[in-house]
Image (cartoon, rainbow, N blue to C red):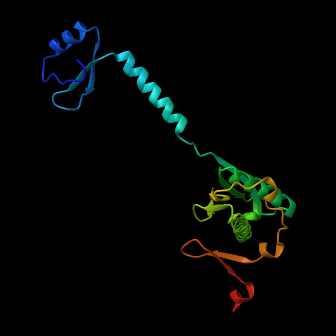
Amino acid sequence: MDGEQIGIVSYVEARQRAADVKLDLVLVADKSTPPVCRVMDFGKLVFEQKKNLKAQRKTSVTQKLKEIQFHANIDTHDYQVKLNRGIDFLEKGYKLKVVLSFRGREMQHQEIGFQLIAKVIEDLKEIGTTEDQPKLNGRMIVIHFTPVRTGKSKTKSQTYTGEVDESALLTEVEFDEEGQLVEVDDELKEN
């Protein structure tokens, strides 16, 4: 009974063989014809399966998602604080979800929101890559970032501390077919 195959036997005979050696008759493959059974200790099988499952959970990495929220009329200091928080999340290896919410009549000026999202994409391009295009979903623009693995982890002193260029927030921004950022000057657009 050390793993050798017995062949096709009746259910009663298989049960008798398992009882003779004080083990259990375990159904291994019920979909096959005839069904395949094994004489073994069922408690030990369950223990081994739980142990393997626990080991798999230890080695698997769960990707956590963090979120930062903006509004269309955000102040430059608030923008910097939230951007630094997003950079911190990406440096720690979290995925980042950036949400820009419109309130009230802000929905009439969606271009301001898309300009702000383009500024966020530009500021985070060294630390994270975008998974998709910014999408307008109801009253929100949503975009996801994944961290860029560079081999070295950055220290906290290397986070973004620059000023926000307000003129960049007022330019028109478009995306091409590949998802690349394309700026359009207002003077060129009028011609």
Most extreme residue toward the bottom, as rendered? Answer: 191
Q: Give the quadrant of the N terminus.
A: top left
Percent across and percent down for residue 113 are 72, 66
Is 43 or 191 nearer to us in this picture?
A: 43
61 to the left or right of 36:
right
Residue 164 lies in quadrant: bottom right
Is 114 or 149 nearer to us in this picture?
A: 149
Q: Residue at the location (62% across, 64% down)?
A: 134
Is 2 or 15 nearer to us in this picture?
A: 2
Percent across and percent down for residue 178 are 54, 73
Is 103 or 120 nearer to us in this picture?
A: 120
Percent across and percent down for residue 24 are 29, 14
Q: Residue at the location (16% across, 31% down)?
A: 33
Q: Residue at the location (71% across, 51% down)?
A: 89
26 to the left or right of 149:
left
Q: How many marks?
A: 0
Q: Give the quadrant of the C terminus.
A: bottom right
Residue 189 lies in quadrant: bottom right
